[in-house]
Amino acid sequence: MVKLIHTLADHGDDVNCCAFSFSLLATCSLDKTIRLYSLSDFTELPHSPLKFHTYAVHCCCFSPSGHLLASCSTDGTTVLWNIQNGQTLAVMEQPSGSPVRVCRFSPDSTCLASGAADGTIVLWNTQSYKLYRCGSVKDGSIVACAFSPSGNLFVTGSSSGDLTLWDDKMRCLHSEKAHDLGITCCDFSSQPISDGEQSLQLFRLASCGQDCQIKLWIVSFTHILARSMEDQLKQFTEDWSEEDVSVWLCEQSLNDLVDIFKMNNIDGKELLNLTKESLADDLKIESLGLRSKVLRKIEELRTKVKSLSSGIPDEFICPITRELMKDPVIASDGYSYEKEAIENWIGKKKRTSPMTNLILPSMVLTPNRTLKMAINRWLETNQK
């Protein structure tokens, strides 16, 4: 039996989202505001409505602890609110400036994901209010997002119908076309499925689409994470198959070379042994610029092989040089780089992030002393 107990009519335009905490109800609207109501009697709190956004508010959500509220808007911002007094704690601007369609907290409240209309997805550190990781999907807007109960995985759904699974390092673990006409919502079940194997953790995932379908998926956390580690190791070895090489070419935006490499049976071992002569004479790649790009990407792979074999932790490796950092600095994209490498990058008038390819909001570089000390400790331990 369902019984209507109350109706709220304070917003001046369409209401886009509502969310519960243990004691409050939050709502957000096209009227640019967020409103807070007490669950005890449905009265609006004295500091409500919350006003900051300059355009429509698309989504709002409480942190699992109920102490924080997040909202996101067409104005390209995701805002953290203090629900006790209605004050803004942080205004986090989507790096691309694109309208933000969805936001979700991780189960431990340490991260907040924000997905935008241009397909970018950002993980924010809710303690420092800084960008932690950034990624993007190939097509469509990010319109749905959900974290796994353990928080080590999250899923995004796009308006083009793609369902994408990420780990907490923003590595894409799986992506596929789930709904023909776009995804509207997705969520993980909070309860695992028992299959008799204590080492295997299975969870249900549901996705909804504009194709009038609801699809249920089984996600194997242990297998996916193991496969991610296996893929990461495989990425730096000679064990690639021809299909792996094709995938790598696509990831490097070298799609036009897939057929040429397949016709010449280029696997991982062959790839690492390619030279400028073999690219020109054997593979018949005429463009000097294209050959140079392929060689540059292959050299990056060789460097990764070297770093992996040396056992250097990945976070100690500069994303630009792929070598152990000696003087790490933090750029305005939140990532750490070797100082000389990022200075050279910026000096070549590249104002985009080497990691996200988005415009750097600032050219300021801050010494990462904590990382430098960690690298020095690692060197002392491993080079005795």
Image (cartoon, rainbow, N blue to C red):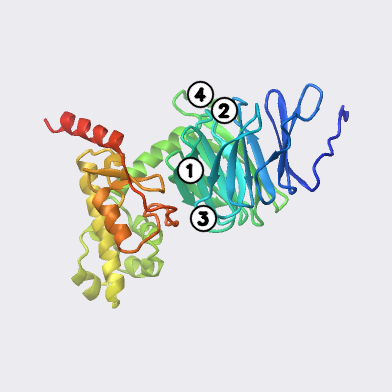
Mark 1 / mark 2, whichever is N-terminal: 1
Determine whether the residue tagged by mark 2 lies in a helix, strand or loop.
Answer: loop
Q: Position of residue 332 (x, y in %)?
A: 40, 48
- Tell us which disc is closer to us: 3 or 4: 3
Mark 3 / mark 4, whichever is N-terminal: 3
Q: Residue at x 68, y 23 (%)?
A: 22
In-image side of 104 versus 30 (left or right): left
Q: Which mark is residue 96?
A: 3
Real-space Cα distance between discs 4 and 2?
Answer: 9 Å
- Tell us which disc is closer to us: 3 or 2: 3
Real-space Cα distance between discs 1 and 4?
Answer: 26 Å
In-image side of 65 versus 380 (left or right): right
Determine whether the residue tagged by mark 3 lies in a helix, strand or loop.
Answer: loop
Q: Which mark is residue 196?
A: 4
| Residue type at the position of mark 4 | Gly
The front one of 224 and 148 is 148
Real-space Cα distance between discs 3 and 2?
Answer: 39 Å
Q: Position of residue 296 (x, y in %)?
A: 26, 62
| Residue type at the position of mark 3 | Ser
**Crowd tier of the residue under label 2, counting other residues whose Cα lies within 10 Å: few below 14, some 14–19, many 20 or above:** some
Q: Which residue is mark 1?
A: 166
| Residue type at the position of mark 1 | Trp
In-image side of 349 versus 59 (left or right): left
Real-space Cα distance between discs 3 and 1?
Answer: 20 Å
Q: Residue at x 57, y 48 (%)?
A: 115
Q: Which residue is mark 2?
A: 193
- Furthest residue in direction bottom, as rendered: 286
